[in-house]
Each structure stands twice: as C-alpha cells, then as structure tokens.
Image: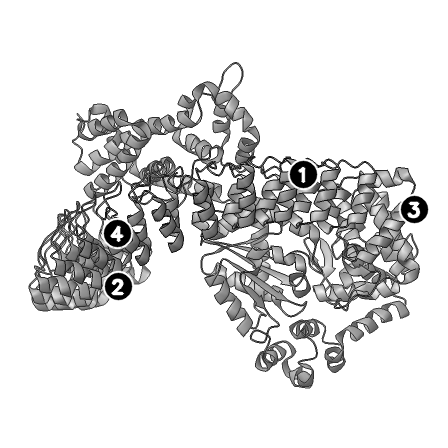
C-alpha cells in the first residue's frame, strides 16, 4: 500500500495532471482554429521555407519535423503535436499578436489575449519542470492553478473549465499517487538529469551558432589583451554613459583618433555588466541573433564603409531597419557602431535615423582629447621620450595612433615622426626600393591590390589564372621578375608584421586603417597603371577620383589624365563580369560630369556590347544597371538603358523594381519616364509594398497624384494588411489622405491587427487627418483585434484635441477593450488628467472594472496619479471596491508607496484593514516594501498590526525578514506580537536571524523575544544564523544564553550547520562555549564528517584539536 501523500505533494500531482493532461487540449483548440485540421497538410506545405528556416535555427527539432512532414500516405495531425510544437507554429506562422513581454515571461493579469494564455501555460510547464522536489506550497499552488485554469477556459471553453474544477477536488487514485512516489524515490537522479538538461538547454537557447560564438569569443579575448593599453578618456566615459542610457550609439571621428579602440573598450565594459557582446557585419545577424530575454550589445565597426560611404551597404541595411527598430524598442538590446566622419557626413546617412539618435563625435569640443589626456597617452606609450613631442600634440587628429605606432617601432626618429609621420613612412618604403628590397616593396603593394585583405592561401596554395596574373603583374610593376616565387612574397609579408602589417585569421592587413590609407595613396602615385588594371574593384571605386573635388580626403588618389580612358575601361570590364554594384557605387558616379563622360564611352561601344551591359545582373545582388541608376537618379543613363530594351519591371532579389526605387528616392521625373515605358505601378516588393503605398508612406504628393491618374490600385494592401491611405494616415501626409479619399479609397478598411486608418491617425496624433476622416464618416468606434478603439488609442498617447473631437462626434466613451479596459481607465492608468476630466464631464462610468476587477480609481492609485484619484473620489468613485484578487485601492497605493493617495483614501473612510485573497492587509503591503511613512499613518489610524495573512505572516515578521528597521521599531512600540509564529513555525526573530538583520535582532532581544523557539522543522534562531554565517548575530544570541546544542528534526545542531557551510569563526565561538562537537545527526554524520566532506580544512583541524571523534 502506498504511503499517504502530503498536501504539497498532492498539489504537485494535480498541477502535473492539469498541465500534461488538460492544457495540451486547450492549446490544440486554438491551434485547430488557426490551422483547420482538414487543411493542415496544405497549410504547412505553403510555409515550408519558413519551417525549414526554423529547423536550421534549431527552433524545430528533427522529431518535430517528422511530425510536420510525414511519409506518404500519412498526413500531419495536430493530435500528434505536443504543446511546444503547437506554440512554435502559432508563434511563427500566424498573425496573432504576441504577448507584450514575449512568450517566455508570465503576462500581466490585465492581458488576456490567446497568445498571452499560451505564454501562461508555457511558463507554468517550465516552472513544473524546474521543481527539484515533487512539492508545491499551498499559496503557490492556488496562484498557479487559478492562472492556468483561467487560460485553459479562455482557450478551450467552459467544458474544459469544468474538467479543471473536477480535477482540483477529485480523489487521487493509486496510479496518481505513484507518480509522486516514483519522484520521491529517484530525486537525486532527477536533480542530476536536470543539470544535464539545463546545460543542453543553454546551448540550444543560444541564438548564435556555436561556431560564430567561438569566433566572437576569440576576438573578445584579443580585445581584452589590447584594452590593457587603453587610456580612459572623457570621450570613453561619455560613450559608456550614452550606451547605458540609449538603445543605439554612433561613435564617429576621422581615422586614427581612437573610435575603434573606444568602441571596443566600451563593449568590454558593457560585457562586465551582463551584456552579451556580439560582433556583427551583416544586419541580418542582428535579427537572427536577437534574444528578447537577454541583454545584448551588437557591435559594428566601419558602418557603411571603412573609407567612404558605400551605397551597397545601405541597400543591405534598408530591408532590416524596421525590424531593428523593433528590436531596439526592447530595452534589453542595444547597438553601438563606429564610422568614419566622412561616411557619417555623407547625405545618404540621413536616411539612417536610428544611427543618428545618439552620436558621439570624438573630435567635438567636449569630447576631443584634452592636453592632459594627450600627455597621459604619450607618457604611457613613449615613456621618457614623451617630453620630446609636447610641441606636436595638436598637429594631427590621429595623435593616439601615432603614439601607438611609434611604441611598436621606436627605432625611427621621434620628432620627425610626430612632425610628419607620413613623410617618415614614405621614406621607409622608398628605402626598400632604393636598396633593392623589391620583394618587400611588392608585398606591400599586394596588400593594396587585394584591398587590405590578402589571404595567405593566395601565396601558399594553388590559385586560378586570374589571381596568378594579378600577382605577376604586381611583381612586374615593382621591378620583380614575373616568375618570383609566391613563397618568397609570403616570407616578406611575414617580415613586415608589426611595422606595417598584422595577420588576422590568415589574412594580411595593415596595422591600422590610417596606414592603409597612406599605402593606397603612395602606390597610387608610384604604380597607378598596375592598380587600375589589377586592384580590387572596391578599392579603385572608393579611393580613385578622376577630377579633384572640394572637401575630398587627402589620401584620395587623383588619376592622371592619361589614365582616364584605362580607368573607364576597367569599370566597363568589371560591369561585364557582373560587378554591377561596384561600378555604380564608384565614387566617381556621384559626379554628374563623370557620368556624362562615362555614357559617352558606353555609346562608343558596339550595340551588342551595350545591350549585354544593360542586361547584365550583379553576381551577388541580382541588381541591373537600371535599378542602380534609379538610386543615383541619372536620367540620360536611364534613357540609355531603356533604349536597349531593358525590362522596366526587372526586380532585385527582394522583388524591388526600378519604379519602387525611384518612388522611394522621390525622383518624380524618373517615375514619369518609367511609367511611360510601361512600369507596373501595382507590382509589389516581397513585403507587399506597392509603389503607390511607398509614395504615400514617404509623402511624395506629386508622385501619388501621378499614380492615381494612371489608375493605380489605391486599396491594395501589403503583407500586414496596410493600405495606402493607412500609410498616409500613420505618417501624417494630410494632402495625400485627401487625394485618396477623394478617389474613393476605403478608409474603414483594417489591417491584419484590426487597425483602421482613423486608428493610425489617432495613435500618431495627426489631428487634421482625424478631422478629415470624421467629416467623411469614418467609423470612429471600430476596434482593433484587441478590442481597443480609436478613442482609447488617442487617450494612451495623450492627444487631447483628438480625444475632444471623438467625444464631440459621439465616440463610445464607456466601450471597453477585450480585457475590459475602458477609456477612462486607460486615461487614469497613464495619468492624463485633462482627458480624465473630459471623460468624467461626459458622464463616463468611473466605477466600471476590467476583466480582472480593476477600476479606474485602482489604476490611478497604482500609478500614483494623485490629482486623478482626487477627481474620482470627488465624483463619488467606490474606494473600497476590490479586484478579483481582493486588492483594494488603499492596498494598491500602500504597495506602491503613494503616501498622499493613501492619506486621501483613509481620510475618505477607506477600509484600511481589508485583506486580499492571500490575507495580505494594507499595512502588511507597506511593511513588505518599506514605506515607513505609510505604515506610521496606518498605525496612527488604528490599523490591525497583529493580523496575519494566509501563511500566518504578521506585519512585524515581514518587516524583520526584509530588514526595514524603522518599521520594526514602530510596530514594536505599538505593541506588535514579536513571538507569534507563522504556519511553518517561523518567528520574527528567526526571520531576522536568517536574513542577517543584526540591528533588528538586537531590538527583538531587548524586547525579550523568545530566542530558543523553533520552527516546525526544529530550526532555532541560533541554528538559522549559524547556517548562513551571521557571526555577530550568533554572538548576540549566545550572550543571551541561547541553547547552542538544540537540534532540528534531522538531528542537526548549530555546530553541525556551521561546519557544513564552512563558517570557521562561528564554529570557534560555539566550541569556546562548550558545544557538543561529537553529536551526530539522524544519518549518523558528525560535525567533523560534514566538515571533511565539504573540504573545510581549518574547521576539521579545530575539531580534531578539541578531540573530536
């Protein structure tokens, strides 16, 4: 016969049966509503690519995959899916609005959407899996049971609610009881298993692939080594402060000032504060690596190019910007970037608003290096020679770099170097050539040719003919034999490490970007012909100009006139090889005069070659010249493309057409040309955005008019259900909204979340648009999928004028959202006093509660909006009404420490002794969180300070446990019962001893507290203090005469506890008092055995010296 279960064990069994037996069927009920069982197979096949991606990310495992795509003739059946798989599919394949805090947190009580109920079930399944013992305490069980059964009833309906109620009271049979007995018999194995599972879980939860993680860790170790040489500056401190306070920070400066060093230093500082530092180059990695429950810092160096603004980079970033903004709205995730000043100052950077939100310019007056900081840097790197270059501190912005470079190569003349470092380097390289070290000279030239990323394998392994030819041509240009051994060049590259070069992950590159700038400029003067013909297309595209420009970087190479034709021919050759992006992102393409000459060169080609170029796709991006030219906005070249029968509707990889690009850039004339050539104005990108919708979003009024005149579909929606009029309403383009409405656009149409045009305008505060829609008869009471009305949206964002307009139109001011939130309650919660006044004047129901029983006055009390509480009380609001957990307004105000509100409520006659469902009173709540003034007020009013909660906790006991000394003093002065124990036998003094609140223990002893009273497990105050190592408290108790040999129910004495946990000083104290050091516990273990088992050598020696057995 199985032994009887304790109440806590029964709780565990019932919760197990609830979560494993009933909750999966409730989740399946929602799943089958979203994925009709008859169509499940076809629904999953349609989403195959998404599901495959989830499998690659290890979100879906192989066994789950096998259930989704079964072998013929079997088809998938939701009855075979577990809760985890169903939640994954609902989360990733449906338009259900996710819970506010994500799926991995327990949602708040006022959130009752289907997805929040999924999160609740997921949370408590995880809670159950992590219990080390098969027990759940009563209060914990009641809370969990109510939350889970409410979620089940909402998902599965009343029949499932009845099943839950039956399960709660039914007698557990033999098989149910054996569940818990098996757990009890194998508890040790479960704990070990859980450790293994946790280890695996952490690995699986890491959103960063293990190989990438390993590389990042390796780089961070390198950063830590170099950071030892970092001198902290006011700029570094400022950047650290900024990234702590902001979601995104951009560090900018010219090369060599220290932006990369500062970026790395700050990133390492953030790592010490618990941030997962992730180095990324691809914006897609931010989306892929993002974990909503983890503090993450994404680090990006050389944003948008490491020399000049790279148009290709911004095209890569653009599709991800909206998702990155959403990621940054989660305060746990941050981005820090560094970019060159010339890149930041480019006009195209303006479109990246997220990277302009907080900018730290290291050359600005308040962040540039001070004289003292320069002195510190010089003394650190140059030691005794620092005094020799004081006069040259301000010659170059790159002073920190110069100090570092000299430190690594101290043989050069220090004054010459700091007066003009580049002349020194030029002389060094000239010397290589003059002294016949041609192979070293050639090695440096190869670093330039391969754009500062020379793969070691190019010189040690077999290479293709094109690469071999480039190396041979470079050798020839450097006065070496074309057949020079590549291994010789490899040796020479290694010999230049630490002077000019470094090697990172098998690639040679210069020790700093500034050195590379100089090398390109140097070889651009010396071997210009070789570079034009052989260098990486990105290099000659970023660093070579045909004509001198104003404000150009001093290291830009100006191509001599005699080589212009060769340079243009090289661009055409790259184009023909599919390097379309490189050609049209060439810095010369920004200059209209160059584009004119380039077009002349193109027209000189035969028609077949011209046609081939115009029809060539980029090898990586699938771009065509026409798409690139729409970015640039060059009309003559666009005419050239179109004259060669280029498909005007040819898309990029993401379905973006030339017309969509031109609209996004606001190029009206090009839009007209493309439309005249038959561009499909209704064609959408992969996100479902059409040209007309983009024009509406960015506010190009004339372009919208053109589309409407052409007959564009002004009601066509994107993948999220957004229509053109909705976009114009959201972004506040009043004239466009007027045009669309005049054309007959459906302004009552809703997106996938149920948002209408007027809802968007209300949310964003576009008053004139709201007025227009109301005049047209827009449905101002239409709610979104969460039951939130336009009025509630306007209230939430405090758009007073819009609220007034809606109320004047007759908006339903008592209409509640799905979770029961009324307009007045919403206004009370966010503290918009004027709006509350408007609603009350209209006659709003100020006592109407939400689904959890919260009233407007409760919301105002919770958030501390004193003026609103006063208004509601003056109107006659019910200040004693409780929510479903029996929390009253006064208890809520006590809990959150709103003293003035408590005073108002008490003066009104609020019941300050009314307890919630867990038996907590207002005074107890104030005691727990330490609101001394509120406690004093309630005590003066006569609050019951000896009333217990359901666990038997008293206000004085709670205050003792959390250490609020002043509150304990007030309660004792009032006569609180300090010897009363809770349901587990814990007294006030025991709580204070356990938590180490020495002053409180002293107060209780002075009052005469019973210091030998034990709890239900036989633990005494002195034993509790011994266990956790509170030496001073143990001394006080012993001085009072506490029984130091009294044992708990397991036979543990105070000396045994101190020995087990290694508290040497306490053991010495107890032995000096004469404690029994040979007394064994119920398992037969003695104090010396415990100390031996846990390796407390000093204690073992003490016991043996005393004569322990």
Nearest to N terminus: mark 2 or mark 4: 4
Mark 3: secondary structure: helix
In screen coordinates, is 880 left or right of 23? left
- Circle 2/circle 4 CB separation < 8 Å: no
**Can you identify the residue that label 1 sits on?**
653
In screen coordinates, is 939 left or right of 500? left
Real-space Cα distance between discs 2 and 3? 99 Å
- Circle 1/circle 4 CB separation < 8 Å: no
Nearest to N terminus: mark 1 or mark 3: 3
Q: Nearer the viewer, mark 2 or mark 4?
A: 4
Q: Residue at x 76, y 39 (%)?
A: 617
Q: Residue at x 75, y 64 (%)?
A: 517
**Split into 4 quadrants, where in the image is the C terminus?**
bottom left
Real-space Cα distance between discs 1 and 4? 55 Å
Q: Residue at x 43, y 37 (%)?
A: 754
Real-space Cα distance between discs 1 and 3? 31 Å
Nearest to N terminus: mark 1 or mark 4: 1
Real-space Cα distance between discs 1 and 2? 76 Å
Given residues 157 and 236, the one toward you in this image is 157
Q: Is residue 468 above or below residue 1070?
A: above
Given residues 865 and 51, the one toward you in this image is 865
**Can you identify the residue that label 3 sits on?**
604
Mark 2: secondary structure: helix
**Can you identify the residue that label 4 sits on?**
840
Mark 1: secondary structure: loop
Nearest to N terminus: mark 2 or mark 3: 3
- Circle 1/circle 3 CB separation < 8 Å: no
Q: Nearer the viewer, mark 3 or mark 4?
A: 4
**Can you identify the residue that label 2 sits on?**
1102
């Amino acid at each position: 016969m199985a032994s009887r279960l304790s109440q806590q064990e029964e709780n565990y069994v019932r919760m197990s049966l609830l979560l494993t037996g009933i909750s999966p069927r409730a989740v399946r009920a929602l799943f089958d509503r979203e994925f009709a069982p008859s169509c499940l197979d076809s629904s999953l096949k349609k989403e195959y690519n998404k599901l495959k991606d989830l499998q690659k990310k290890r979100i879906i495992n192989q066994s789950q995959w096998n259930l989704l795509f079964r072998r013929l003739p079997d088809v998938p059946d939701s009855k075979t899916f577990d809760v985890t798989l169903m939640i994954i599919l609902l989360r990733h394949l449906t338009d259900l609005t996710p819970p506010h805090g994500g799926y991995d947190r327990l949602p708040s009580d006022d959130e009752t959407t289907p997805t929040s109920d999924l999160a609740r079930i997921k949370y408590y399944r995880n809670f159950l899996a992590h219990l080390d013992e098969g027990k759940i305490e009563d209060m914990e069980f009641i809370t969990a049971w109510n939350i889970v059964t409410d979620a089940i009833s909402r998902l599965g309906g009343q029949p499932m609610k009845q099943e839950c109620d039956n399960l709660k009271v039914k007698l557990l049979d033999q098989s149910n009881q054996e569940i818990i007995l098996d757990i009890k018999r194998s508890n040790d194995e479960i704990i070990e298993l859980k450790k293994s599972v946790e280890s695996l879980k952490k690995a699986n939860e890491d959103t960063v692939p293990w190989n990438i993680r390993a590389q990042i860790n390796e780089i961070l170790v390198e950063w830590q080594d170099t950071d030892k040489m970092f001198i902290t500056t006011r700029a570094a401190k400022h950047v650290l402060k900024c990234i702590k306070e902001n979601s995104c920070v951009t560090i900018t400066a010219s090369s060599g000032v220290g932006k990369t060093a500062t970026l790395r230093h700050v990133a390492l500082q953030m790592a010490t504060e618990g941030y997962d530092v992730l180095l990324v180059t691809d914006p897609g990695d931010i989306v892929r690596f993002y974990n909503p429950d983890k503090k993450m810092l994404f680090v990006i160096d050389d944003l948008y190019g490491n020399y000049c603004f790279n148009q290709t980079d911004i095209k890569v970033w653009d599709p991800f910007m909206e998702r990155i903004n959403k990621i940054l709205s989660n305060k746990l995730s941050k981005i820090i970037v560094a970019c060159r000043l010339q890149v930041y100052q480019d006009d195209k950077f303006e479109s990246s608003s997220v990277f302009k939100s907080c900018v730290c310019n290291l050359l600005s007056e308040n962040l540039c290096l001070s004289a003292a900081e320069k002195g510190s840097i010089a003394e650190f790197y140059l030691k005794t020679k620092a005094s020799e270059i004081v006069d040259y501190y301000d010659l170059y912005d790159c002073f920190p770099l110069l100090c570092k470079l000299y430190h690594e190569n101290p043989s050069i003349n220090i004054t010459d170097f700091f007066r003009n470092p580049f002349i020194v380097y030029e002389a060094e390289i000239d010397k290589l050539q003059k002294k016949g070290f041609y192979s070293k000279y050639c090695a440096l030239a190869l670093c330039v040719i391969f754009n500062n990323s020379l793969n070691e394998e190019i010189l040690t392994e077999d290479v293709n003919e094109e690469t071999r030819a480039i190396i041979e041509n470079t050798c020839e240009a450097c006065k070496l034999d074309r057949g020079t051994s590549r291994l010789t060049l490899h040796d020479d590259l290694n010999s230049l490490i630490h002077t000019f070069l470094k090697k990172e992950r098998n690639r040679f590159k210069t020790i700093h970007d500034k050195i590379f700038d100089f090398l390109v400029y140097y070889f651009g003067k010396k071997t210009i012909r070789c570079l034009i013909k052989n260098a990486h297309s990105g290099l000659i595209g970023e660093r070579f100009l045909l004509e001198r420009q104003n404000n150009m970087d001093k290291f830009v190479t100006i191509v001599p006139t005699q080589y212009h034709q060769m340079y243009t021919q090289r661009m055409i050759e790259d184009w023909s090889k599919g390097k379309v992006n490189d050609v049209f992102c060439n810095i010369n393409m920004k200059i209209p005069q160059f584009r004119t000459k380039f077009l002349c060169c193109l027209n000189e080609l035969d028609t077949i070659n011209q046609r081939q170029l115009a029809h060539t796709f980029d090898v990586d991006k699938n771009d065509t010249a026409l798409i690139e030219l729409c970015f640039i906005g060059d009309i003559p070249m666009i005419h050239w493309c179109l004259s060669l029968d280029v498909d005007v509707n040819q898309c990029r990889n993401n379905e973006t057409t030339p017309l969509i690009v031109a609209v996004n850039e606001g190029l009206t004339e090009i839009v007209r040309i493309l439309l005249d050539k038959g561009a499909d104005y209704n064609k959408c990108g992969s996100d479902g955005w059409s040209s007309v919708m983009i024009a509406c979003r960015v506010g190009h009024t004339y372009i919208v008019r053109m589309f409407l005149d052409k007959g564009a579909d002004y009601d066509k929606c994107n993948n999220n259900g957004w229509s053109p009029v909705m976009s114009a309403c959201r972004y506040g383009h009043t004239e466009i909204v007027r045009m669309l409405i005049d054309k007959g656009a459906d302004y009552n149409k809703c997106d996938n979340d149920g948002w209408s045009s007027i809802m968007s305008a209300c949310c964003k505060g576009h008053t004139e648009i709201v007025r227009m829609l109301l005049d047209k008869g827009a449905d101002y009471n239409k709610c979104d999928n969460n039951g939130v009305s336009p009025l509630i949206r306007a209230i939430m964002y405090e758009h007073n004028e819009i609220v007034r307009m809606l109320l004047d139109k007759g908006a339903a001011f008592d209409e509640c959202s799905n979770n029961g939130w009324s307009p007045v309650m919403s206004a009370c919660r966010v503290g918009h006093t004027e709006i509350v006044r408007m609603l009350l004047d209209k006659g709003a129901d100020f006592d109407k509660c939400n689904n959890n029983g919260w009233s407007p006055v409760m919301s105002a009390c919770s958030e501390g909006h004193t003026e609103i509480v006063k208004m509601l009380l003056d109107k006659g609001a019910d200040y004693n009404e409780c929510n479903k957990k029996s929390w009253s307004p006064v208890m809520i105000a006590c809990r959150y420490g709103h003293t003035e509100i408590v005073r108002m409520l008490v003066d009104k006659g609020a019941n300050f002794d009314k307890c919630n469902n867990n038996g907590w009173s207002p005074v107890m709540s104030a005691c727990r969180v330490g609101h001394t003034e509120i406690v004093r007020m309630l005590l003066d009013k006569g609050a019951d300070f000896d009333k217990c909660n359901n666990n038997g906790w008293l206000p004085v006991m709670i205050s003792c446990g959390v250490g609020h000394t002043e509150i304990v003093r007030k309660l004792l002065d009032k006569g609180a019962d300090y010897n009363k124990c809770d349901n587990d036998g814990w007294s006030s003094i025991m709580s204070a001893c356990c938590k180490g609140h020495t002053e409180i223990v002293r107060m209780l002893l002075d009052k005469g507290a019973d210091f030998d009273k034990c709890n239900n497990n036989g633990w005494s105050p002195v034993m509790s203090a011994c266990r956790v190592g509170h030496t001073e408290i143990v001394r006080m108790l012993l001085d009072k005469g506490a029984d130091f040999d009294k044992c708990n129910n397991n036979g543990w004495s105070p000396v045994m506890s101190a020995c087990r946990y290694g508290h040497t000083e306490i053991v010495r104290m107890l032995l000096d008092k004469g404690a029994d050091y040979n007394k064994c516990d119920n398992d037969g273990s003695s104090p010396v055995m415990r100390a031996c088992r846990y390796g407390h050598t000093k204690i073992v020696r003490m016991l043996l010296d005393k004569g322990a057995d």
